Image: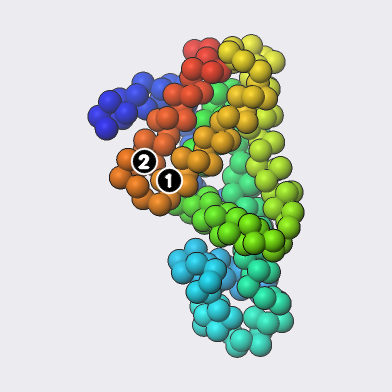
Amino acid sequence: MRQERAGLDALGEVWNTGEDPSEPIPEAAAPPREQQLLAAARDAVVEEGLEATTVRAVAARAGVSTGVVHYYFENKDQILLKALRQAHDEASRRRDAIMAEPASSAEKLAGLIALAVPTHGAERDEFILWLEYFRVAMRGRLPGADLPMATRFRQYFFDVIEEGARSGEFRPTRDVNVIAEQLIGLLDGLGQVAVLDRHWMSYERMAYLVYDFVESTLRPQRP
């Protein structure tokens, strides 16, 4: 573990965005009732799982009657999908903020990776909700409902890697689309193991392995 920590520190100059990506981005206005119910539903699904989440439990968390919950959600699948979309949108606002910064491609990519390591906050909620969604989708429910969200998430990585390669900041060892695909697969796979709290895959270990992959395949130029 000391070696991994040292490796992360050594990459700090290139992979430090200078900001804490976990800091919340302020909302323009207070969320409407549906957003409040979604927050309660999201907490229930993340903490208890979809199967254990009931309309009564969501109502109790939100401090409303079950009839109010039924007005906004037809069933559990709809609760899950809307909660996933809410968490995804929150995380995407942070990703959009990173992409809009006048920073290097390496700094932007580092920020995206930091948000993809599901340690806490909206990013962790989103990751767990994705796992719940996959369980539902594998049983033929909500087919294709994830495609806009999945496509949006993927595009961030394709765009920043292509940007860095085009500018000469990255010196890719293979096709940039292949690297982007492999990086996303690495984030998804390692993230699942880390969320399961396996002793061999801490979040620090996950970050180290991902940054090591990026270093070896994109070979970012040092400032």
- Which residue has dot 1 on it? 193
Residue sitting nearer the eye, 143 or 88: 143
Measured as percent of width and height from the top left, residue 93 is found at 63, 47
Drawn side of residue 139 relative to residue 127, left or right: right
Q: Considering only vertical position in the picture, is 48 above or below 25? A: below
Q: How many residues crowd around disc 2 within 10 Å: few (fewer than 14), some, or many (20 or more)?
A: some
* Residue 24 visible in the displayed image: no
Q: Which residue is mark 2?
A: 201
Q: Secondary structure at mark 2?
A: loop
Upstream in sequence: badge 1 or badge 2: 1
Find residue 38 and report its image quarter.
Answer: bottom right
Name the residue type under label 1.
Val
Do the residues under discs 1 and 2 have CB atoms within 8 angstroms?
Answer: yes
Name the residue located 47 percent from the left edge and 47 percent from the top edge. Answer: 192
Indicate the amino acid at tag 2.
Met
Q: Which of the 4 quarters of the picture holds residue 154?
A: top right
Instruction: Please report the residue visible at 27 percent of the width from the left and 32 percent of the height from the top.
Output: 1
Mark 1 crowd level (few <14, some 14–19, many ≥20, 10 Å Cα): some
Q: Position of residue 223 (x, y in %)?
A: 50, 13
Q: Marks 1 and 2, Cα distance to the nearest angstrom?
A: 6 Å
